[in-house]
Image (cartoon, rainbow, N blue to C red):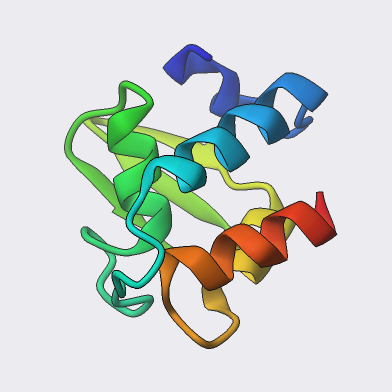
Amino acid sequence: MGARQYLIKTVTESDKRHFIAWLEKKPARETYDYHESTECLLAQYLRDSGFTRVIVSQRSFYHNTAEGSLPLKFNEIASTRPHTFGAALSRAKTAL
């Protein structure tokens, strides 16, 4: 998936599979800080997907000098506790 795809609001099946595949590669017991806008689950995911200098808010993210929209389901998956990658993977498989 290219970084540019998140500049549009629609999320394809390929995007969903990519997100789940990324979560599957993360250590299941590793935690993330949902409230840390540069190191939260979604910031890490976006950086690994090709974005640079990422800052995430609830509904959008910023990278370099541009803004993109986040799929609401992705934020719901990231915000729900527990904040471990394994728990987020389980939520993603259910929600997406």
Residue 55 percent location from the top left of the image:
28, 52
- Identify the residue at horizontal 28%, vertical 35% (top origin): 47
Residue 89 percent location from the top left of the image:
59, 58
Depth check: give the residue in front, 11 or 14: 14
Q: Quick one: which residue is furthest to the left in this view?
A: 53
- Left or right: 39 in relation to 46: left
Residue 49 percent location from the top left of the image:
38, 26
> Which quarter of the figure has residue 21?
top right
Count the labels in the image.
0
- Left or right: 17 in relation to 60: right
- Identify the residue at horizontal 61%, vertical 41% (top origin): 20
Residue 85 percent location from the top left of the image:
44, 64
Depth check: give the residue in front, 36 or 81: 81
- Left or right: 39 in relation to 10: left
- Identify the residue at horizontal 56%, vertical 26% (top origin): 7
> Which quarter of the figure has residue 90?
bottom right
Q: Is residue 25 visible?
A: yes
- Identify the residue at horizontal 44%, vertical 79% (top origin): 83
Q: Quick one: which residue is furthest to the bottom in this view?
A: 81
